[in-house]
Image (tube, helix red, strand yellow):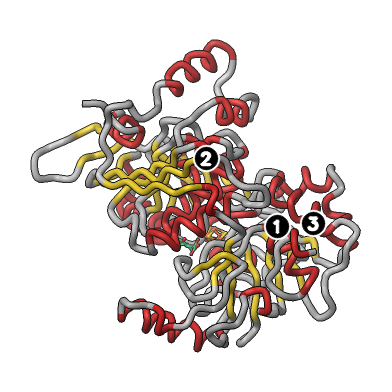
Amino acid sequence: MGRTLAEKVYDAHVVRRAEGEPDLLYIDLHLVHEVTSPQAFDGLRMAGRPVRRPDLTIATEDHNVPTTDLLKPIADPVSRTQVETLRKNCSEFGVRLHPMGDASQGIVHVMGPQLGLTQPGMTVVCGDSHTSTHGAFGALAFGIGTSEVEHVLATQTLPQVQPKTMAVTVEGPLPEGVTAKDLILAVIARIGTGGGQGHIIEYRGEAIRSLTMEGRMTVCNMSIEAGARAGMIAPDETTFEYLKGRPHAPRGEDWDRAVEYWTSLRTDDDAVFDKEVVIDAAELTPFVTWGTNPGQGLPLGESVPDPVSFTDPVQRQAAERALDYMGLTAGTPLRDIRVDTVFVGSCTNGRIEDLRAVAGVLGGRKIADGVRMLVVPGSMEVKKQAEEEGLDEVIAASGAEWREAGCSMCLAMNPDKLTPGERSASTSNRNFEGRQGPGGRTHLVSPAVAAATAVTGRLAAPADL
Ligand SMILES: CC(C)[C@H](C(=O)O)[C@@H](O)C(=O)O
Ligand code: SF4
């Protein structure tokens, strides 16, 4: 029987398999950041062990970094300690680190692919749930916990129980004005936040094939929000085109050999998935969330749902609680919801193409009175590229703030936060209670919707302007 893409990559990395035990997988790339690594390095130190493959281990500073005044010391003591600890650990264990201010620093899931570190067919791990992003290249990439980070640092392997496989096929071309973010929000609304649990999702179909690498990363990034272990997309010309010439991409004959192997990384026609979902791209429209989990979303043209419309009692209760927390009334058209803040950034939508989309909408326009808008590049490289293209000027001229790279307002681990009751339209991936600051209210949106929302002050799509 044929194998799926996920099975091919998985099988190629099993170094030990024994009845009744987890498999031992070889890890090709281990990405590290300041939040989930301190105890792992402590563990190594206590055991007197080195990092087994420092050459396959790369660290960056992202969660705790401020996005203004890079030259000043970090004011918050907890954040400062996290970042200083990472620096100390990396220098002690010989791990390459891209610190604040470095040209390649950025959110771990933005800087890795951009350096060409993430490649098709690899196993990629990081102590971070959104490691699923790297699956956009046809890599098997997933988040791990801190004790697993220690295991990988020490051995370059990881015990794993093989996940099941799931296909999400999006048929037909994406309608005009519908983006990768709308697509993945619609997928999660359809299958639920537990819909992918225990599975590696492979995204397939014409709508997926037509996405750029940036769009594919947006889709795979949010696999975890559907509960999946990982998300993957088979590598193709779009993938090779993106990778070619990047600092860590193979060159010359190595490149040709790599492309030959990468081309074999597709699901065989007779392979069988454990679960399959098919979505018609023609039904997709700009999509926003109204609730407090990424599955509580609807097309922008709809209204805040009435909790009684949910037949499942658990969903009904979740909706009641979400409306209460979000300060929303059932029946309110989503387009009538006013926001205080717009956040563009994160490992979901902080890439160059996202910033181009935002500048494209903001060009020649002003953001609404009373709205603050933060535009935060996902990496210093994205920032540089955006500035070379003049996007920063367009964004600043509209009244938005142009910042340094980092996780920023995606999660409240640095100075960029919502205040209690403040409402945001955010291009990030999580809208949980307090995610962007205690009491903050988050609507997940695409970059295009974020920009249009900043202009009108209410949830809006570019077509509304
Ligand atoms: C801090 C980190 C462990 C966390 C994650 O695992 O995803 C963060 O990146 C997030 O997005 O919530
Ligand atoms: S940008 Fe957000 S989701 Fe991505 S790694 Fe940072 S905190 Fe996590």
Q: Is 91 rendered above or below residue 444? A: above
Sequence-wise, the earlier of marks 2 and 1 is: 2
Q: Is mark 2 within 8 Å of ligand 2?
A: no
Ligand 2: quadrant of the figure: bottom right
Q: Which one is nearer the viewer's eye here, 376 or 333?
A: 333
Query: Where does the image place residue 282, in percent across and percent down from the top left?
Result: 54, 48
What is the secondary structure assignment of the residue under circle 1? Answer: helix
- Amino acid type indicated by mark 3: Val
Which residue is labeled 3 in the image? 361
Say whether disc 3 or disc 2 marks the residue closer to the N-terminus.
2
Residue occupied by mark 1: 448
Q: Which mark is residue 201?
A: none
Quadrant assignment for the C terminus: bottom right
Residue extending farthest to the top is 253
Residue type at mark 2 is: Gly
Locate residue 363: give its quadrant: bottom right
Q: Position of residue 379 (x, y in %)?
A: 67, 50
Q: Residue 172, labelled with which disc?
A: 2
- For mark 3, give the secondary structure: helix
Q: Position of residue 271 (x, y in %)?
A: 27, 31
Residue 326 location, quadrant: bottom right
**Could you tell me if the residues under marks 3 and 1 are in contact, i.e. CB atoms within 8 Å?**
yes
Q: Element type at marker 2?
A: loop
Residue at image position (65%, 70%) is 425
Quadrant hosting residue 124? top left
Residue at the spot 58% in from the left edge and 13% down from the top edge? 252
Whether residue 388 is visible here, answered yes or no, is yes
Q: From this view, report whether residue 95 is shown above or below residue 456.
A: above
Q: Quadrant of the N terminus?
A: top left
The residue sitting at 58% across, 40% down in the picture is 211
Mark 3 to mark 1: distance in Å?
Answer: 7 Å
Left or right of 236 in this view: 115: right
